[in-house]
Image (cartoon, helix red, strand yellow):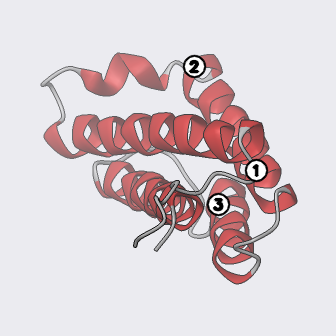
Amino acid sequence: MNLRGSLGGIAVAGLVVATIGIYVARAGRAPAPVLPPAVVLMVVAAVLLAVFRTRTWPAVVAVVVAVAEAAGVILTGSLGNLGFAEPLLGAGTALRVIGVLVVLVAGTLLVVRPGAAPRTEPTS
């Protein structure tokens, strides 16, 4: 597997972790609909990354979705849930933040280095 495939897999994992975090926070009594729009966006971005592995545009979509989710976490004041008062709420928020950060790093690397692949030395 080349570096691009590894970064794509890491970005997909980040999207999955952030999605799980939303449902863990919901189990901790976070106000959220049964199917939050962020979940739909993250699942679509993960599928696009998995299906179109050799393209750059799915990574752009994933980064945009991660930025939107990060903005949602910050603007709604969810970062305040990271305390220990409500364990499920805090754990869900932590998973969301970790997942989003992973997507931002891996997705940005995929966009900045679209042809990233390990160099191999010729063998004799």
Circle 1 packing at 10 Å, graded few (<14), some (14-19), many (20+), is some
Reading the image, the residue beneath label 3 is 42
Reading the image, the residue beneath label 2 is 74
- In front here: 66 or 29? 66
Question: Badges 2 and 1: C-beta atoms under 8 Å apart?
Answer: no
Of the residues tagged 3 and 2, which is closer to the observer?
A: 3
Kind of residue at badge 1: Pro
Residue at 67% across / 37% down in the picture?
108
Total marks drawn? Answer: 3
Reading the image, the residue beneath label 1 is 114
Against 99, residue 80 (above or below) is above
Which badge, 3 or 1, comes first in the chain's sequence? 3
Which residue is situated farthest in the front direction here?
Answer: 124
User: Residue 124, position in %: x, y?
Assistant: 40, 73
Callout 2 secondary element? helix
Against 33, residue 84 (above or below) is above
Which residue is situated farthest in the right direction here?
Answer: 57
